[in-house]
Amino acid sequence: MTLSLWATLLAACFVISFTPGAGAINTMGNSLAVGFRRSIWGILGQQAALVVHIVIVAAGVGVLVASSPLVFEIIRYAGAAYLVYLGIRQILAKPSAVPEPSVAPEPVEAEADADASPAAVARGESRWSMFRRGLWVNLLNPKAIVFFLAFLPQFIRPGLPLLPQYLVVGATVVIVDVIVMWGFFAVAAQGLRRLTTSARGQRIVNRIFGSLFIGVGVLLAVVH
């Protein structure tokens, strides 16, 4: 791949990653719930899903999904339902108890981030749980397969070895998305962190992100 072609790919990846979607909402929600640093586990799950999509397209299975209305619809509605489920669960989530300030603060376990609020520490969602949720949020989006099916061939030259090209494209897509998700969306969510120090604030945040999840799920179901 030439440098000019890769630069075009890099610019396109940044534009795509900055476009708000379910992955961005999931990242911001994780950053608020468990802290900036631990939110990386949800982001890694999302990247694992992107790798799966790229592998599917590279293997040619993406053509089958794009050309089979039944397969596409099943996956599309499953993805929409999962996002709506996450949104409802977020809205109905009970606020965590906010401990009273003490004279000598108790030491925080190494598992928790220094930037995590006491409420976030109390919730303590596991890394695997965040990874798994991030995986399903991106994996159950058939439009990603169709998008990659149209996007990736623009940067692949059939006359050259395909594997090195797909590796370069895949690595660029994943690295850029990690940078944007963690360096922008997870950081942006920290501006709302003060809301999570009270039960009322937690309910507001839960309703905001729950509604966003539901909105994305509905759009995924109705927009063709």
Image (cartoon, grey):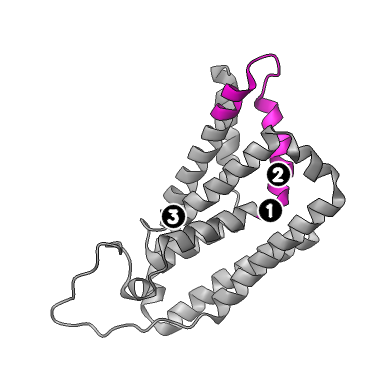
Residue type at numbered disc 1: Asn
Residue shown at 65%/15% (left/top)? Answer: 160
The correct choice, above or below, for 28 with respect to 58 in the image is below
Helix, strand or loop at label 2? It is: helix
Indicate the quadrant containing the N terminus: top left, top right, bottom left or bottom right.
Answer: top right
Q: Are the residues at dot 2 and dot 3 in contact (C-beta closer than 8 Å)?
A: no
For label 1, the residue is 141
Residue type at numbered disc 3: Trp
Of residues 181 and 149, the one nearer the viewer is 149
Check residue 92 for magenta coloring. Answer: no
Q: Residue 19: horizontal and vertical position, in percent?
A: 60, 49
Q: Which residues are magenta?
A: 140-168
Q: Are the residues at dot 2 and dot 1 in contact (C-beta closer than 8 Å)?
A: yes
Residue 145's disc is 2
- Outermost residue toward the top in this view: 159
Q: CA distance from mark 2 to mark 1?
A: 8 Å
